Amino acid sequence: MTGPIVSSNHDPDPYVPETLSELDDYVVPMMGNAPFFKDESSYLPDRSIDTEFYGLIEGFGRVRDKIGEEQYAKAIDIAAHMKALFLEAADEDDPKTMEGIMLIHELIDIIDAARARRVKSKLKDDEGRVTGD
């Protein structure tokens, strides 16, 4: 994507997860925000399906070396399919929303597997600790 994807009245840069744990923290709440990803509280007035999926895709890009090329490609395909389902969904009870939420679980599995491999291999995070990041 090019250029800001949110209104110029607010922060033009949507949040992008930097680590596997941040990505996990980003993905899990998507289940409760599907299918529209609108902020009802007004704390995040620029949140939209586009900003959420921008953060998701860019976040997977930032951990690409940690999850591997095959899992990265799979995650990007899942994200594209999820977004398409959510765009077609009429509301949160729509079967397409439920199908998209099931795909969120697949993304969580990709993240969890990468974190488990990193812990098992005793790979250190940026702070020099074995955390799975």
Image (cartoon, helix red, strand yellow):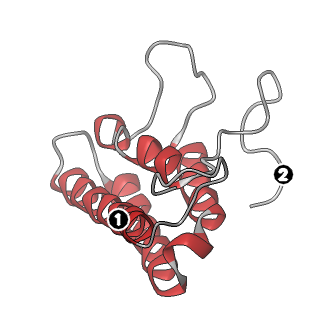
Residue 81, located in which quarter of the rendered image?
bottom left
User: The residue under label 2 is which amino acid type?
Assistant: Gly
Q: In this view, does 14 lie above or below 94?
A: above
The residue that disc 1 covers is 116
User: The residue under label 1 is which amino acid type?
Assistant: Ala
- Does 114 sit left or right of 63 as displayed? left
- Graded by Cα atoms within 10 Å as few (under 14), some (14 to 19) or many (20 or more), the crowding at tag 1 reads some
Q: Where is residue 82 in the image (x, y as percent from the top left)?
A: 37, 62
What is the distance, in whole Å, between disc 2 and disc 1 at their CAs? Answer: 35 Å
The residue that disc 2 covers is 3
Count numbered badges in the picture.
2
Q: Where is residue 69 in the image (x, y as percent from the top left)?
A: 54, 85
Q: Residue at x 65, y 62 (%)?
A: 62
Asked if labels 1 and 2 touch by Cβ distance under 8 angstroms, the answer is no
Q: Which of 112 and 71 is in front in this view?
A: 112
Mark 2 or mark 1: name the one nearer the start of the chain. Answer: 2
Residue 117, located in which quarter of the rendered image?
bottom left
Q: Residue at x 80, y 44 (%)?
A: 4
Q: Where is residue 12 in the image (x, y as percent from the top left)?
A: 79, 35
Which numbered disc covers residue 21? Answer: none
- Graded by Cα atoms within 10 Å as few (under 14), some (14 to 19) or many (20 or more), the crowding at tag 2 reads few
Q: Nearer the viewer, residue 122 or 37?
A: 122
Residue 57, located in which quarter of the rendered image?
bottom right
Q: Is label 1 in a helix, a strand or a loop?
A: helix
